[in-house]
Amino acid sequence: MTSFQFDPSLTREFIDFGYSLYRDDRRRIPPIRRSVARQFSPDYPFYNKQGNGHKHFLAYQGRRVVGRVSAMVNAALRDHDGTAVGLIGFYECREDEAAAAALLDAARNWLREEHGLRRIWGPMNFDTWHGYRFLTKGFDRAPFYGEPDNKSYYPDQFERYGFVRRRTWNSIEISGRPQLESLIARGKDPYALLLDRGYRFVPPGGPDRRNDLRKLHALISRSFDGFLGFTPIAFEEFERLFDRLRHALARPMSMFIYDEADRLVGFGVTLYELSEAVRAMKGRDHPLSLAKFLFYRRRARRLNFFAAGVVPEERAKGTGIGKAGLYYVVDRALRHGCQDIIFALMAKENRVQGLFRQAGLDAQREYALYELNI
């Protein structure tokens, strides 16, 4: 076992293992190598926040890497009861129980002995703004871009070590006009009533793109405050993270919601599903890869309803704004000829899940965040 923080040679081995492990996996969407490497650079924002810490670990059999993991301390992260939480992320391992246990031992011991942490969540890379959760159901389906993508045996490795599920999410994909119309039937009247009251549902895409990002950053920060694992980030960091989604944004099917007093109270972000375009790049971002990306991007018609939220005071009014927003997005998708939509990464306790159950729609994919108390 080898540990490090910013060693260039070991960082290269750490990153390379994440590609070699999936070399023969045709369902894999290889992440762009330059973007991955950026997350291990000393100037990445996480490493320069006061109180944060990390250690990367590589497990070997002889000279061969068989696993990797990072232990991380996010000083801003607290559980709902106020307990500080350590993180385990960037986990990749061969189907080798001894290697898995050794990696998790190393990460757990560092978090406990160096930082006194007794509660650990994983997988989570830095925070909920980055990659987190394991895919636990849906390995028979092609992944969509931005979905957790991991080996099917990873959840078992965590559970055998002693981790238990802390929270579960799912994704539901609907294809065809009849099912989509059935889903939003209960949202048509709330949408009309809100319009009559003076609410506005406005797509992004004004002349000032940066102002739209500022509005979105503020809305996400307010809407998700109090959600499990949420930590605020500065606008500049948010802008860098969102930059990679700019080519995917389905503007006509996204929205800002204003109330009758013209206050910004909600949002919805819908993306064109670009797994085919990103897979064609094969992890590279040179001109030929970018040309392939743009070729497939122009053909994209499948959508990913990626994120939505409402500020707490609006949520408390019980106006049906969630149903209305869903109606707005899906109705506009149908008007634009898009009849295949992924409703991505919804917490199982989210109230919107009731709409899917009422429409007789079941989740095809499931994800979990795990917790270990030591």
Image (cartoon, rainbow, N blue to C red):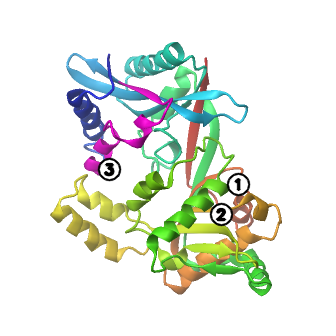
Instruction: Please say if the residues under marks 1 and 3 sit with CB atoms less than 8 Å apart.
Output: no
Residue 344 sits in quarter: bottom right
Residue 218 sits in quarter: bottom right
Q: Which residue is mark 2?
A: 361
Q: Is residue 220 magenta?
A: no
In the picture, the quarter occupied by the N terminus is: top left
Q: Is residue 120 above or below residue 233?
A: above
Q: Nearer the viewer, residue 165 or 54?
A: 54
First reached walking from the N terminus: tag 1 or tag 3: 3
Q: Nearer the viewer, mark 2 or mark 3?
A: 3
Task: Give me the C-alpha separation between circle 2 and circle 3.
Answer: 31 Å
Residue 32 at least partly seen: yes
Dot 1: what SS?
loop
Q: Position of residue 61 (x, y in %)?
A: 26, 17
Q: Position of residue 92 (x, y in %)?
A: 37, 33
Task: Give me the C-alpha separation between circle 1 and circle 3.
Answer: 29 Å
Q: Amino acid at mark 3?
A: Pro
Which residue does the image show at 41% across and 42% down from the upper left? 45
Which residue does the image show at 57% across and 66% down from the upper left? 215
Q: Amino acid at mark 2?
A: Leu
Q: Is residue 51 magenta?
A: yes
Dot 2: what SS?
loop
Q: Which residue is mark 3?
A: 31
29 horizontally vs 136: left or right: left
Segment tinted magenta in the rendering? 32-56
39 horizontally vs 234: left or right: left
251 horizontally vs 94: left or right: right
Q: Amino acid at mark 1?
A: Asn
Q: Which residue is mark 1?
A: 350
Which residue does the image show at 50% across and 42% down from the upper left? 132
